Amino acid sequence: MYDEQKADLLLIDERKGRSVAKQLKIRYIGTAGILMLAYDKGYIGQPDVKICLDTMINNNIRLGKKICNTIMAYVGLEERY
C-alpha cells in the first residue's frame, strides 16, 4: 500500500513493522512522533498532548509509559504516567 500510494512517510507503531521499514529504507513515524510534530508546528498545545495520551490510554491503545513520559517531557510537562 505504501508503494502504491507513493507516500512520503509511513505511519506505523509496531516494532516489527518499523524494523522492516528501516531495512527497506522507508521513512516512518509513529504516534509519538505525530504528537511531537503537531506540538512543534503549533497545531496542538501542552494540554492537548496530555488529552491525546489520556484518551489513547483510556481506550486501551497500547502506548508504553516510557513513550508517554518521553512525549510529556518533550512538550515540557512534568506529570508522568
Image (tube, rainbow, N blue to C red):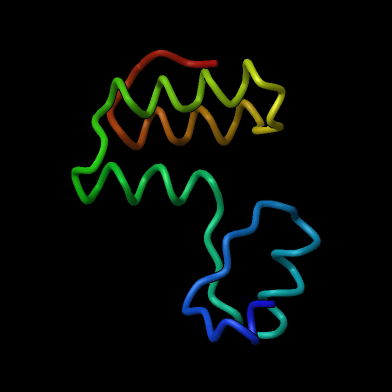
Quadrant of the image occupied by residue 76? top left
Residue at 64% across, 78% down? 2
| Position of the N terminus by quadrant | bottom right
Q: Position of residue 3 (x, y in %)?
A: 64, 86
Q: How many discs appear?
A: 0
Figure check: 5 above or below 17: below
**Residue with the most extreme right position:** 16
Figure check: 5 above or below 45: below
Question: In the rendered view, does 33 fall on the left or right side of 15?
Answer: left
Quadrant of the image occupied by residue 28? bottom right
Figure check: 9 above or below 12: below
**Which residue is at the front of the view, 4 or 8?**
4
Residue at 74% across, 68% down? 19
| Position of the C terminus by quadrant | top right
Q: Position of residue 79 (x, y in %)?
A: 40, 13
Question: In the rendered view, does 8 fall on the left or right side of 23?
Answer: left
**Residue with the most extreme left position:** 42
**Which residue is at the front of the view, 75 or 28?**
28
Question: In the rendered view, does 45 fall on the left or right side of 63?
Answer: left
Residue at 53% across, 30% down? 68
Q: Position of residue 38 (x, y in %)?
A: 31, 46
Residue at 66% across, 21% down? 59
Figure check: 41 above or below 4: above
